Image (cartoon, rainbow, N blue to C red):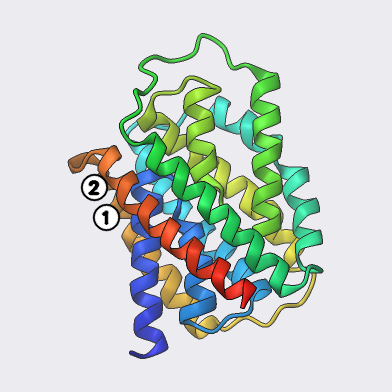
């Protein structure tokens, strides 16, 4: 199977995850870029940010059209993560490849477990009367640091935080998480691009294109299939990816 075909398939899966769940796509994108398309960890995390930004913009427009984006809540959450994302992005490009791979594998385990545990958990049903600024800032800063360090949008962390910490309904949390992903990823990418990293645009462009298309399909899929079912599927995929990466980083 050619690299172009693999890029198209991987992009579609990433788009489905981001469009349907508001997260998890970037945790799939980076391993796909490394193991399927031959990118180094530094290039993969930078390319992952580019792909996630493009895909999340598409998903955000679709969710905003349906009134499922809480702009003030998401803006506060995202603003707190800008500086941590930029600082962590500057650190990331200087870390050894093995360290990045192992750290990403641990992150994939966390993401997979969170998705599996969240499946079947009761969701918040109402809107918060006021945004708890301190809690939003703390959670947003932590998410920004993860985004900058490992080149992931962090939606798999943002969605649970928006539901449990800020009491958003699940569908609104998915839409709002895309706003957070875009802001944090852009801050991290701006710092990374200041350090030249060779990028294979012949593979990144089709990967991003199918991810964008997949995000629209993911949004429609989420309306037809239960969120719990989607979380179980992607949670299992992430755990499999994590095991593979951990083994690879040790051997």
Element at badge 1? helix
Identify the residue at horizontal 39%, vertical 64% (top origin): 211
Identify the residue at horizontal 71%, vertical 47% (top origin): 145
Pointers 1 and 2 in contact (CB under 8 A)?
yes
Q: Residues within 10 Å of mark 2 (few under 14, many from 20)?
A: some
**Which residue, given by chain and number where applicable, does mark 2 sit on?**
220
The reply, left or right, for residue 146 in relation to residue 64 is right
Question: Which of the image's four quarters has the C terminus?
Answer: bottom right
Identify the residue at horizontal 32%, vertical 60% (top origin): 214
**Which residue, given by chain and number where applicable, does mark 1 sit on?**
217
Residue 2: percent from left, percent from top: 37, 90
Q: Is residue 179 above or below residue 150?
A: above
Residue 26: percent from left, percent from top: 50, 58
The reply, left or right, for residue 35 in relation to residue 43 is left
Identify the residue at horizontal 68%, vertical 72% (top origin): 42
Q: Nearer the viewer, residue 241 or 58?
A: 241
For residue 231, what is the image quadrant? top left
Residue 68: percent from left, percent from top: 38, 31
Element at badge 2? helix
For the residues labelled 1 and 2, the Cα–Cα distance comes to 5 Å
Give the residue at the far left of this rendering.
Answer: 224
Marker disc for residue 27: none
Residue 61: percent from left, percent from top: 40, 45
Question: Which of the image's four quarters has the N terminus?
Answer: bottom left
């Amino acid at each position: 199977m050619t690299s172009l075909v693999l890029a198209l398939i991987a992009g579609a899966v990433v788009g489905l995850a981001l469009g349907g769940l508001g997260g998890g796509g970037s945790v799939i994108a980076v391993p796909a870029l490394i193991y399927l398309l031959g990118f180094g960890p530094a290039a993969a995390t930078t390319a992952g940010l580019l792909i996630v930004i493009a895909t999340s913009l598409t998903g955000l427009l679709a969710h905003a059209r349906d009134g499922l984006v809480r702009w003030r809540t998401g803006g506060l959450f995202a603003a707190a993560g800008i500086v941590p994302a930029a600082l962590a992005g500057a650190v990331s490009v200087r870390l050894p490849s093995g360290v990045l791979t192992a750290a990403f594998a641990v992150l994939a385990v966390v993401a997979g477990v969170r998705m599996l545990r969240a499946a079947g958990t009761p969701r918040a049903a109402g809107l918060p009367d006021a945004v708890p600024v301190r809690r939003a800032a703390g959670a947003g800063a932590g998410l920004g640091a993860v985004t900058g360090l490992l080149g992931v949008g962090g939606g798999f962390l943002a969605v649970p935080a928006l539901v449990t910490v800020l009491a958003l309904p699940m569908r609104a949390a998915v839409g709002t998480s895309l706003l957070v992903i875009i802001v944090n990823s852009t801050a991290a990418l701006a710092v990374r691009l200041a350090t030249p990293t060779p990028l294979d645009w012949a593979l990144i462009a089709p990967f991003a294109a199918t991810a964008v298309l997949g995000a629209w399909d993911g949004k429609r899929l989420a309306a037809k299939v239960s969120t719990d079912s989607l979380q179980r599927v992607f949670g299992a995929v992430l755990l499999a990816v994590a095991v593979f990466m951990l083994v690879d980083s040790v051997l």
